[in-house]
Image (cartoon, grey):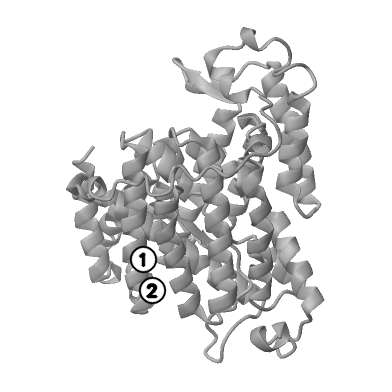
């Protein structure tokens, strides 16, 4: 039955191999169960509810991807977009998190329209490939900075803007955890990120709640406390339906909807193109297999994310872990989705994890996201300069939106300035004007 539905034998695989590939993919990506609620909780989103939302959307998205698109691709809340949600929209621009969830929903609606009407080629052509690569790298650097700040490694300094934090037990624990995680990743250990999170958490447990009496910590260190509240509990569904749909439609918030749409769309498309190319999961035209169905599922997952209470879900590049193990069909994604379900009942155990324990994982994700930097034409300065502007301003301004805006602006200005205005597509001129208008919103 499974073989007939998923065409496993025709794909050159076996049920056993598909199941093992699903487990491998899950182990590579299960860090998101802890990391996503940790990031969203910085925006005021309750951790238990965010964890429930993360598990639910990962289950539904992966299940739909496997059953409908029949591709071995995991779907879960995207790294990068959750940083945009928390640090740019809520903490930066001051949106209530309920309104930010509304923006997620409307971006998902637009994404679904683009996916259903197969508009991916027009959208791809609108944004130069160099900028797409640079934005992905910039988000990776941004996530790295977030990890370093959360760990206390980077701190504010009135003389130099930023500086190195003091070598406190908290920072030493982070550095040990980072070293362990980096070595595991370099050795290509399955589940390296989640092992790193567990090791760092265990280092914080033995000596009381945090290296001694919890009453002695500063407010900045409060987030690193290890608090035990049991092992299991019923899922917290309190975030379902908490989004503010009407509030998100204010004109001032439209740029955020667009940036979410842009990030989700290109993240999904680049992930499908990359892992399908690497795994030779291509159709007769050389395109990713079932790309239209896959994009529709990705869009629906992003749309559902808002009502569930989390930032948009997207296809995961960690799916390559299962493909490298021989996974070829949608059964891989189905197995991944099912493996998420038990974690609905483990929010007390997972809330034990301090923020410094997720910081090494964030930094490693930043390393992974820098891979597209090799595709930027650094020897062609009219391409390299706008790419560099977008990539460096995302972490330095602590805003994905600002980095993207100045990337668009610099691309048009440089191309026109060197006499290559013909390389600026009509849709890019529209984005240029929108970017100028966006600057006056801040």
Residue at 54 percent of width and 50 percent of height? 54
Name above or below for residue 347 compared with residue 137: above
Name above or below for residue 20 compared with residue 29: below
Name above or below for residue 287 compared with residue 411: below
Query: Element under label 1?
Result: helix
Q: Are marks 2 and 1 in contact (CB under 8 Å)?
A: yes
Cα separation, mark 2 vs mark 1, equals: 6 Å
Q: Which of 224/440 is in front?
A: 224
Image x and y of residue 391, in percent: 45, 48
Residue at 31 percent of width and 37 percent of height? 95
Query: Element under label 2?
Result: helix
The dot on residue 111 is: 1
Residue 373, quarter of the rendered image: bottom right
Residue farthest toward the front in the current orientation of the protein: 234
Image x and y of residue 413, in percent: 26, 55
Looking at the rendered structure, the number of numbered marks drawn on it comes to 2
Residue behind mark 2: 115
Q: Which of 396/202 is in front?
A: 202
Residue farthest toward the top in the current orientation of the protein: 216
Image x and y of residue 245, in percent: 27, 50
Residue at 44 percent of width and 15 percent of height? 158
Name above or below for residue 112 compared with residue 85: below
């Amino acid at each position: 039955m499974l073989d007939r539905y998923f065409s496993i034998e025709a794909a050159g695989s076996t049920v056993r191999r598909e199941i093992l590939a699903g487990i491998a993919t899950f182990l590579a990506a299960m860090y998101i169960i802890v990391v996503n609620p940790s990031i969203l909780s910085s925006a005021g989103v309750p951790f238990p509810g965010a964890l429930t939302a993360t598990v639910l959307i990962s289950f539904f998205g992966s299940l739909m991807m496997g059953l409908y698109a029949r591709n071995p691709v995991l779907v879960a809340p995207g790294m990068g977009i959750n940083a945009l949600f928390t640090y740019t929209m809520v903490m930066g621009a001051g949106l209530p998190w309920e309104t930010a969830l509304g923006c997620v929903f409307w971006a998902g609606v637009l994404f679904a329209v683009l996916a259903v009407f197969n508009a991916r080629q027009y959208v791809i052509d609108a944004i130069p490939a160099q900028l797409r690569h640079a934005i992905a790298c910039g988000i990776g650097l941004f996530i790295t900075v977030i990890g370093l700040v959360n760990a206390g490694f980077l701190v504010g300094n009135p003389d130099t803007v930023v500086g190195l934090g003091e070598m406190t037990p908290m920072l030493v624990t982070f550095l040990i955890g980072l070293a362990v995680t980096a070595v595991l990743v370099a050795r290509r250990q399955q589940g390296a990120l989640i092992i790193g999170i567990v090791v760092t958490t265990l280092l914080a447990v033995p000596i009381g709640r945090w290296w001694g009496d919890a009453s002695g910590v500063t407010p900045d260190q409060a987030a690193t406390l290890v608090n035990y509240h049991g092992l299991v509990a019923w899922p917290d569904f309190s975030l379902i339906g908490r989004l503010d749909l009407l509030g998100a439609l204010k004109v001032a918030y439209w740029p955020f909807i667009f940036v979410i749409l842009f990030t989700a769309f290109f993240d999904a498309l680049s992930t499908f193109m990359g892992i399908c190319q690497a795994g030779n999961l291509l159709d007769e035209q050389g395109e990713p297999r079932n790309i239209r169905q896959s994009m529709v599922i990705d869009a629906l997952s992003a749309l559902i994310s808002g009502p569930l209470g989390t930032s948009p879900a997207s296809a995961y590049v960690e799916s390559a872990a299962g493909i490298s193990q021989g996974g070829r069909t949608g059964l891989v994604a189905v197995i991944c989705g099912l493996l998420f379900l038990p974690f609905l009942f483990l929010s007390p155990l997972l809330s034990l994890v301090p923020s410094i324990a997720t910081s090494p994982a964030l930094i490693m994700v930043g390393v992974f996201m820098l891979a597209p930097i090799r595709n930027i034409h650094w020897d062609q300065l009219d391409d390299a300069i706008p790419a560099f502007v977008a990539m460096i301003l995302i972490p330095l301004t602590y805003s994905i939106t600002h980095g993207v805006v100045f990337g668009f602006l610099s691309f048009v200005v440089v191309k026109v300035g060197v006499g290559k205005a013909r390389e600026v597509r009509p849709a890019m001129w529209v984005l240029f004007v929108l970017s100028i208008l966006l600057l006056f919103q801040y």
